[in-house]
Image (spheres, rainbow, N blue to C red):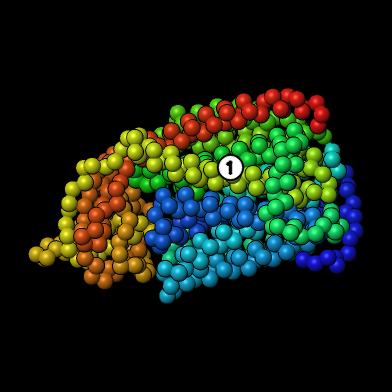
C-alpha cells in the first residue's frame, strides 16, 4: 500500500447494484470462505496426522485465528484510516493468495517427507489467516459508509452479513468435506484454496478508488498505546458502547457454540466423521445467512435496535430447544438453524450502529478497537470451553472410564485407518498368537503412518460403522504395543499405546454438549439483561 494512490470520491448511488459494492461482496465472500475452510481443514489435518488430539485441536483453533486480532488491532485501525481502504482491501486479498500457498506447501510436506513439520505449517496458516482478517475487517466495515448512503446501510449490512455467513457455512462444511474426500492427498485442498484466493483478489480490483479518511495521521509512537484511548472513546459513547458489547458477545457465543458442536461430534458413539460434524457446525451459519438479510429488510432505512432484543430472546429459546433435543439430530439441526437465524437479527443492527455512529475520520480505528474487544470474547470462549470440560470431568458430569481391560501386548503387525482413525488392528504376541480388534473392510489405497500409535480409536461390533468411506492400510514397522479396551453405549473402544506406556485417561462426554448448550442459553439471558436498557434509551435516536 502507498500514499500516492489518486483520491477520488466514490459516488453513492441509490442502489446496492454498483461495481464497488459487488466487488466488495465477492472479495469478502471468498475471504470468509477461505478463513473457515483453512480453519476446519487444518484442524482435521492436525487430528488425522496425530499432530494434535481432538480436544487440543478444538481448543487451539480459535486462539490461533483470533490472537492476531488482539496483536495487530492498533496497526490495523491506523492503516484503515491512514491509507485508502481500497488499497488495504486489495493488499490483504493479495496476501491471502500468499497464505494459501503456504498452506499448500504444508499439505505437501506433511504427506511427502516431513510428516511432523507439514501439519504445523498448516496450523500456522490459521494464525496467518487471522492476521489477514484482523487487517481486512476494519477496512471492509469502514468502507461501507463511504460507498453506501445512510438509508442503504442496514440493507447493505444485511446483505454483507448474509453472504459472509453463507461463506462461513460453505467454508466450514467444505473444510470438513475436503478433508474427508482427500485424506492422504490434502494437496488438492491447498490448490482449491489458492484458486479461490486468486479469484477474490481479482474481485477486489472492482472497488473504485477513494480518498483516505485521515491521510495525515502519524504512526503511533507506542504501537499499543492508541488502543487504550480508542477503547475508552468507544465505551464513552453510549451507542458505540452498546455496539461493542453486543458484537463482543456475538463473537463469544459463535466461538463457544462451534466448540460445543465439535465436542458433540467427538462425543458420539461412534464418533461423527468430518463430513457430518462440519455440516452440523455449518447449519449455525446457514441460519445467520437467513436471518441477516431479513434483519436488513425489516430495519428499512434506520437502525432498528429492537431486532437485537428479538434476536436475543429467540437465541435463548432455540438454545434451550437444542439442549433438550440433543439426541434427536434432525430436531437438533432445526434448533441450530434457528439459533443462527435469530443471531442474524441480533448482529446486523449492532454492526450498522457501529458504522453509523463511529466518527468519519476514525471509523477504521473504532472498528479495530471493537475487534480488540471481540478478542476478549473469542479467547474467553475458548478458555471457558476448556474450563467447563475440565470441570465436568472433575465433578463426574463427564465420568471417567474405569472398566478398561487388557487385551494383548506384542508387535503391531496390521493397522487400518478410516479417514484418519484406526478401525482394525492385528497384534502378534510373544507366543505367536494373533489378536485383532475392529472390523476389517476392503482396502482401497495405502499411505504412510507414524510408528507411535497415540490416540484412542473405536470400532463397532458390527460392520455398520464401516460401510462408508475409504480404508487406509499402514505399515506399523514392528511397533511394540499394549492393547486395552472398554465399552461405552454398545461401542467397543481400543487403546493402542507403545509398550509400557499408560493409556490417556478417557471420559464419557456424551452428556457434556447438553450442558454446554444450556450454559450458552444462560449466558445469552445475561447479555439480554445487560443490553435491554441501553437499547430502549437509544432506539429513538438512531
Q: Is residue 140 visible?
A: no
Residue drawn at 45 percent across, 28 percent down? 324
- Report which quarter residue 38 is drawn in: bottom right
Closer to us: 399 or 362: 362
Residue 219 visible from this viewpoint: yes
Q: Residues within 10 Å of mark 1 (few under 14, many from 20)?
A: many
Task: Tell me if 424 is positioned left or right of 208 in this view.
Answer: left
Q: Nearer the viewer, residue 314 or 289?
A: 314
Left or right of residue 155: residue 273 = left
Considering only vertical position in the picture, is 35 above or below 106? above
Q: Position of residue 452 (x, y in %)?
A: 30, 64
Q: Residue at x 59, y 44 (%)?
A: 376
Q: How many marks?
A: 1
Residue 386 percent coordinates (x, y): 44, 44
The quarter of the rendered structure image containing the C terminus is: top right
Q: From the top left corner, tell me how far across and down residue 105 is, in percent.
A: 53, 71
Whole-percent x, y for residue 518 in the image: 48, 30
Give the residue at x 82% y 29%.
541
The residue beneath circle 1 is: 377
Amino acid at each position: 500500500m502507498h500514499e500516492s494512490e489518486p483520491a477520488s470520491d466514490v459516488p453513492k448511488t441509490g442502489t446496492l447494484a454498483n461495481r464497488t459494492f459487488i466487488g466488495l461482496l465477492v472479495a469478502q465472500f471468498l475471504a470468509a470462505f477461505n478463513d473457515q475452510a483453512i480453519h476446519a481443514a487444518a484442524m482435521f489435518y492436525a487430528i488425522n496426522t496425530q499432530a494434535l488430539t481432538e480436544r487440543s485441536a478444538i481448543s487451539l483453533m480459535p486462539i490461533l485465528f483470533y490472537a492476531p486480532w488482539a496483536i495487530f488491532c492498533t496497526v490495523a485501525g491506523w492503516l484503515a484510516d491512514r491509507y485508502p481502504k481500497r488499497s488495504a482491501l486489495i493488499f490483504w486479498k493479495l496476501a491471502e493468495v500468499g497464505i494459501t500457498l503456504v498452506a499448500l506447501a504444508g499439505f505437501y510436506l506433511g504427506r511427502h517427507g516431513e510428516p511432523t513439520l507439514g501439519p504445523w505449517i498448516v496450523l500456522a496458516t490459521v494464525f496467518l489467516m487471522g492476521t489477514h482478517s484482523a487487517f481486512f475487517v476494519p477496512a471492509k466495515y469502514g468502507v461501507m459508509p463511504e460507498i453506501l448512503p445512510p438509508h442503504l446501510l442496514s440493507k447493505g449490512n444485511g446483505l454483507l452479513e448474509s453472504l459472509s455467513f453463507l461463506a462461513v457455512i460453505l467454508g466450514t462444511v467444505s473444510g470438513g468435506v475436503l478433508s474427508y474426500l482427500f485424506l492422504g492427498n490434502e494437496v488438492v485442498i491447498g490448490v482449491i484454496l489458492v484458486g479461490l484466493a486468486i479469484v477474490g483478489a481479482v474481485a477486489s480490483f472492482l472497488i473504485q478508488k477513494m480518498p483516505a479518511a485521515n491521510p495525515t495521521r502519524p504512526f503511533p509512537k507506542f504501537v499499543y498505546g492508541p488502543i487504550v484511548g480508542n477503547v475508552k472513546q468507544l465505551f464513552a459513547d453510549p451507542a458505540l458502547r452498546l455496539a461493542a458489547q453486543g458484537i463482543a458477545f456475538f463473537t463469544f457465543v459463535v466461538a463457544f457454540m462451534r466448540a460445543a458442536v465439535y465436542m458433540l461430534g467427538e462425543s458420539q458413539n461412534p464418533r461423527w466423521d468430518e463430513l457430518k460434524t462440519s455440516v452440523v457446525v455449518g447449519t449455525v451459519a446457514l441460519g445467520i445467512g437467513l436471518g441477516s438479510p431479513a434483519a436488513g429488510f425489516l430495519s428499512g432505512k434506520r437502525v432498528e435496535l429492537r431486532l437485537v432484543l428479538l434476536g436475543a430472546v429467540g437465541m435463548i429459546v432455540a438454545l434451550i430447544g437444542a439442549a433438550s433435543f440433543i439426541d434427536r439430530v434432525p430436531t437438533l439441526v432445526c434448533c441450530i438453524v434457528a439459533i443462527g437465524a435469530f443471531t442474524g437479527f441480533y448482529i446486523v443492527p449492532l454492526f450498522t450502529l457501529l458504522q453509523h455512529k463511529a466518527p468519519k475520520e476514525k471509523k477504521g480505528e473504532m472498528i479495530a478497537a471493537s475487534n480488540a474487544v471481540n478478542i476478549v470474547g473469542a479467547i474467553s470462549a475458548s478458555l471457558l470451553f476448556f474450563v467447563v470440560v475440565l470441570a465436568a470431568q472433575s465433578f463426574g458430569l463427564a465420568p471417567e472410564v474405569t472398566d478398561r481391560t487388557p487385551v494383548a501386548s506384542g508387535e503391531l503387525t496390521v493397522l487400518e485407518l478410516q479417514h484418519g482413525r484406526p478401525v482394525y488392528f492385528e497384534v502378534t504376541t510373544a507366543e505367536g498368537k494373533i489378536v485383532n480388534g475392529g472390523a476389517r473392510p476392503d482396502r482401497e489405497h495405502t499411505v504412510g503412518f507414524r510408528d507411535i500409535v497415540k490416540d484412542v480409536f473405536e470400532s463397532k461390533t458390527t460392520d455398520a460403522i464401516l460401510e462408508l468411506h475409504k480404508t487406509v492400510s499402514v505399515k506399523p514397522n514392528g511397533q511394540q504395543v499394549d492393547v486395552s479396551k472398554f465399552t461405552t453405549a454398545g461401542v467397543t473402544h481400543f487403546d493402542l499405546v507403545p509398550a509400557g506406556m499408560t493409556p490417556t485417561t478417557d471420559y464419557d462426554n456424551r452428556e457434556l454438549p447438553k450442558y454446554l448448550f444450556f450454559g450458552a442459553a444462560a449466558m445469552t439471558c445475561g447479555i439480554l439483561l445487560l443490553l435491554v436498557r441501553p437499547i430502549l434509551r437509544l432506539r429513538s435516536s438512531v
